[in-house]
Amino acid sequence: MTTSTVDHEQRHVPEPLDVAALRADFPILARTVRDGSPLAYLDSGATSQRPNQVLDAERSFLTTCNAAVHRGAHQLAEEATDAYEHARATIAAFIGADVGELVFVKNATEGINLVTYAMGNAATAGDEAARFRLGPGDEVVVTEMEHHANLVPWQQVCRRTGATLRWLGVTDDGRLDLDDVPEVITDRTKVVALTHQSNVLGTINPLAPVVRRANEVGALTVLDACQSVPHGAVNVAELGVDFAVFSGHKMLGPSGIGVLYGRRELLEALPPFLTGGSMIEQVWMETSTFAPPPQRFEAGVPMTSQAVALGAAVDYLSAIGMDRIAAHEHALTEAAVTELDAIDGVRIIGPTEVVDRGGAVSFVVDGVHPHDAGQVLDSLGLAVRVGHHCAWPLHRRMGVPATVRASFYLYNEHSEVERLARGVREAQRFFGVV
Amino acid sequence: MQLESMYQEIILDHYKNPNARGLREPYDGESFQVNPTCGDEVTLRVKVDGDNGESRVTDVSYDGQGCSISQASVSVLTELVTGRTVREACTTMEAFVELMQGRGQVEPDENVLADGVAFAGVAKYPARVKCALLGWMAFKSALVEAGQSPEANGVEVT
Ligand SMILES: Cc1ncc(COP(=O)(O)O)c(C=O)c1O
């Protein structure tokens, strides 16, 4: 091992993005809103915009080889199946998974429900599914910073099975409270489900200590990677998680397509959730056997052009480089935190130290409700999100009913951060609090 | 700027200086309403005296938290319905709901809506219509809980 002093020469500094050039790939970014203001799209945490390359890939699939995949033997069916499976391979490689470990779902929400319902089904499945069974005395651990998508399905599976839901807390500055880990994750814990990056706080969670503890007690780990996979290099194998989910629409891809990653050995033992066509091996009148994964989890004719377009989105992101995207967003986040923090009466909800922190910046403005602040920003062409961002318990924990959230992506510019800060000052002026 | 068309002075006044907040006893009906997309909340109580058809809203009290639109709207509501017959209050409610759901195409009648006309601009912003209606939804439910549905008082609701 070398004793490396990390100085600026040695550290790998990614080449800056040519934002102006890549913005040209996103036609929507050129539009104006609300009486002619140029759009500043600061809501990619909710959904991202799509470049021409992704739109063209979807259209090209539909105009050349559209057919039901895994069903026909004609040429179109063959080409459609190839395109669909090629997209699976592209996306699997992107996150460091094997192609058979990647299941296409509608979105992250469906991915988590797939896991929770399949675990519920383990009660009546064979012995190979025993490790997925939940019952009274078992515990499921989540965190207080989860999106409802990674909370409500766990509440529900606990209700159905009699298991108990527990959670890791959040510190005042918006970090996961690791002190809770040994006490909350115990021999009773069957599953630890947590977010990689908070969609509200921006916090990037330290996974290593949580995964280590989960492994120690033999619990499964489920990662909500919705806000991490789109914004930086994620390798699920290196992270050592058992399952991970993310949504295509947050990473330049279409809506209606998402991904569930599951370690091969686990997917092989996991009972199905949705059943029907395409997921079977043999069917008789009385009973059926199921296909191996990933087909076992893709019942019915799947989203096809959407999967192909998500593959194109991954190609687009990969060609730019995830480290460059992460560095660009880091710089925007640093600027936003600095500019907003400097405004009297503005409080950032989440870490103000821009370390292990992604590009979701949520804040409150004294005397101006987030809804009203958002309305002023909207009138200036700034698209932000207001409300609780599907993380109501987290907002309660942070002591605020709602926040304004600006979230960044590769196509955002520093000038938009400046407009945001000016807009917040304008909101303060409009509501007479300064 | 468009903003002024939404945030009329009356709305900002009611937001900054709302009619007495705080829940009061006695009351006949109470309702808690929350907007699940943003978390805005209103709890509202009504006191009604007299029989169906003749009954009168003698007190309205509320508490809540939320944006200027939701909180100003419930403050205006208390002015528009307190002391009125249930029939009149429900007619006003109907006019307000119609205005809010009109996407800016409905001409408000100041004789019926008084300060409520200030919300006409909000109707052009579909995402905020729910804010303006939150208190009114609470009022309607509280009336029903008090055994005073609009229908029982001869008011057709849409
Ligand atoms: C952290 C996180 N988890 C889960 C989701 C749910 O994603 P979707 O609505 O695409 O299923 C989102 C986005 O809304 C999110 O930000």
Image (cartoon, coloured by chain):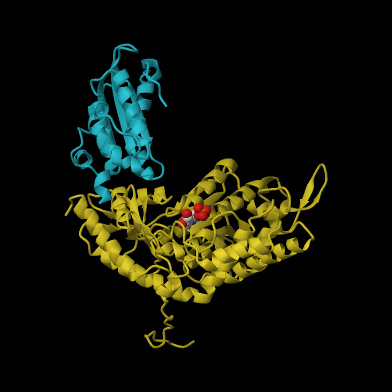
Chain colours: A yellow, B cyan
Residue shown at 26%/25% (left/top)? B81
Location of the C terminus of chain B by quadrant is top left
Q: Residue furthest right?
A: A284
Splitting the image into 4 quarters, where does residue A39 fall?
A: bottom left
Locate residue A279, reporting x and y percent. 73, 53
Q: Is residue A15 above or below residue B97?
A: below
Locate residue B67, reporting x and y percent. 29, 44
* Residue nearer the viewer, A72 or A16: A72
Splitting the image into 4 quarters, where does residue B156 fall?
A: top left
* Residue nearer the viewer, A220 or B58: B58
Q: State whether residue B108 appears in this view.
A: yes
* Residue nearer the viewer, B121 or A421: B121
> Is A245 placed left or right of A200 in the picture?
right
Q: How many marks?
A: 0
Residue shown at 38%/45% (left/top)? B127
Locate residue A40, reporting x and y percent. 36, 62
Locate residue A420, reporting x and y percent. 30, 62
Q: State whether residue B22 appears in this view.
A: no
Residue shown at 38%/43% (left/top)? B126
Residue shown at 54%/56% (left/top)? A255
